[in-house]
Amino acid sequence: MKKAGISAYKIFPASEIVFDSEVRKICEKNTCRLYGKSWACPPAVGSVDDCRELCSRYENAALFSSVYNLTDPFDYEGMVNGHRQFKKNCDSLFEMLVGKSRNFFLLSNEGCNRCESCTYPENKCRMPEKLFPSVEGFGINVVALASKVGLKYNNGENAVTYFGMLMF
Ligand code: SF4
């Protein structure tokens, strides 16, 4: 994980994942403007029950996070750069894992920005093997889950923390 740029992670039984339909309601309000924009977010990922069922096919989960420094709490550019870097970290993790096993599934932070223009909803995803759906979009309460497994959610006002999850 560290080699992929992941700052911290916790491994736990997949049955411990905290699903919360209220999180999906936040998605539906579309404040992030990513709802219905890619195959990585609702409604494309299916209902929260569908997401729960998919996760239940795996025995274990690893919630992971990376922390990026900001110049101040309103450093929007720093947040965007951190998010871009986090997506690269997830790609590095995927490349590290795929050489060892195919029996895993990655979730990442927010939607998918891999392509300049997403095929959703007209055509299938161009890179389904590298489609890492949104951990929040799956209806997972990351705040509650981080607290449950002992991972820091907030790393100070001059930092932004992004989360992903590995199912294996
Ligand atoms: S990989 Fe491309 S086509 Fe697939 S969800 Fe992401 S942006 Fe859309």
Image: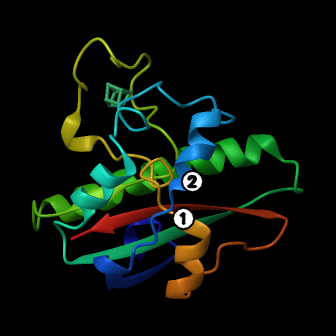
Residue farthest toward the bottom in the current orientation of the protein: 150
Q: Amino acid at mark 1?
A: Asn
Question: Which residue sits at x=63%, y=32%?
Answer: 30
Q: In this figure, which residue is indicated by the disc labeled 1?
A: 141
Label 2 vs 1, first from the N-terminus: 2
Q: Is residue 24 left or right of residue 80?
A: left
Picture coordinates of residue 32, whole percent (x, y): 65, 36
In the depicted structure, whether residue 22 falls above or below residue 61: above
Of residues 52 and 6, the one drawn nearer to the viewer in this rendering: 52
In the depicted structure, whether residue 133 falls above or below residue 103: above
In the depicted structure, whether residue 123 falls above or below residue 131: above
- Image quarter hosting the C terminus: bottom left
Q: Is residue 161 left or right of residue 35?
A: right
- Image quarter hosting the N terminus: bottom left
Picture coordinates of residue 121, whole percent (x, y): 34, 17
Q: Amino acid at mark 2?
A: Val
Question: Which residue sits at x=46%, y=71%?
Answer: 18
Of residues 33 and 92, the one drawn nearer to the viewer in this rendering: 33
In contact (CB < 8 Å): disc 2 and disc 1: yes
Q: Quadrant of residue 40?
A: top left
Crowding at label 1, few (<14), some or many (≥20) Cα neighbours within 10 Å? some
- Give SS at disc 2: helix
Residue farthest toward the top in the current orientation of the protein: 122
Q: Is residue 43 left or right of residue 84?
A: left
